[in-house]
Image: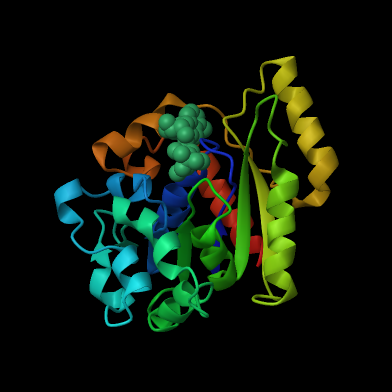
Amino acid sequence: MIVAIANQKGGVGKTTTAINLAAAFALRGKPTLLIDLDPQANSSLSFLDRQQVTQSVYDVIADSSVSLKDVIVPSPVLNLSLAPSRISVAKLEAKLVGELDAHFRLKDRIETVRRQYAHIVIDCPPTLGLLTVNALVAATHLLIPIQSSYFALEGTDDLLETIEKVRARANPALKILGVLITMHDKRTSLGRDIQEQIQKVFGGKVFKTVITKSVRLEESPAYKESIFSFAPESSGASEYYRLCEEVLDRV
Ligand code: ATP
Ligand code: MG
């Protein structure tokens, strides 16, 4: 499975979900690759120090002489490898303008390593630009994190429109794996209202597993750990583990 984690809204839990879902696959003993497509490099820096990132996904997509396996590095998590990002990824959009295969670059590069991994997780930037489109073209599945907040559903129409465009030609097989409610506060009536509203819009697509607010989830990247090693007894660990099981049930 190649799962893209996308939502053009910023700060909704894409990176937190990408790193911990990838870590959950790895914990189950499956060789897993996490591709960081976001120039902010948050998922890379959740496991690596800045100095450890010399080559990045940028080099792979921009330059056909660099292969994906050249930039993949091991992470501190057993069974988890990382294709890191650097700030230069942001320059890609300009670089690929006018290239006929601009939307297919990542898909083509992934093809060369695909058989080595049971699962590939792609962390997308908070835009619907060329990088996110590359992820949607390369992916077999899409997971959409939605933050449990008053403005949660704003912008999802644009995301769904982009998905339809990608499906129309470049990747008809792309499936919406599910919608994940993140940073949820089930103690408040607002939290419960928002959950209901998201379920009304997305119905059965909404994962039963909901990720609640947890300081542990915020802290773990600072220690270069996944939630499973940083705080194995936390709500975040059990929720992301359950999400992983639900994801595997759906494919
Ligand atoms: P961006 O759009 O900037 O890439 P993002 O969608 O990747 O953001 P994250 O970086 O995962 O979002 O989360 C945004 C912030 O919220 C981070 O500081 C993160 O640690 C925190 N956060 C994510 N999930 C939770 C949670 N369940 N409980 C508490 N804090 C969370
Ligand atoms: Mg992010």
Where's residue 186, x and y in %?
67, 23
**116 or 238: which is nearer to us?**
116
Looking at this rendering, what residue extends furthest in the top direction?
A: 188
> Is residue 237 visible to us here?
no
Q: Residue at x 39, y 57 (%)?
A: 27
Q: Residue at x 46, y 81 (%)?
A: 108
Vertical placement of residue 90 versus 248, above or below? above
Looking at this rendering, what residue extends furthest in the left direction?
A: 51
Q: Residue at x 44, y 48 (%)?
A: 20
Q: Quadrant of the C terminus?
A: bottom right
Task: State the count of labels.
Answer: 0
Q: Quadrant of the N terminus?
A: bottom right
Where's residue 152, x and y in %?
68, 33
- Classify residue 54 by image quadrant: bottom left
Vertical placement of residue 145 versus 83, above or below? above
- Classify residue 226 by image quadrant: top left
* Horizontal side of residue 59 vs 9, given as left or right: left
* Horizontal side of residue 235 vs 73, given as left or right: right
Where's residue 195, x and y in %?
74, 31
> Is residue 218 visible to us here?
yes
* Horizontal side of residue 146 vs 22, given as left or right: right
Q: Indicate how the structure is coloured in the image.
A: rainbow
**47 or 102: which is nearer to us?**
102
Vertical placement of residue 178 versus 236, above or below? below
Q: Residue at x 42, y 61 (%)?
A: 94
* Horizontal side of residue 103 vs 66, given as left or right: right
- Classify residue 137 by image quadrant: bottom right
Looking at this rendering, what residue extends furthest in the right direction?
A: 200
Where's residue 130, x and y in %?
52, 61
**223 or 41: which is nearer to us?**
41
Vertical placement of residue 43 versus 149, above or below? below
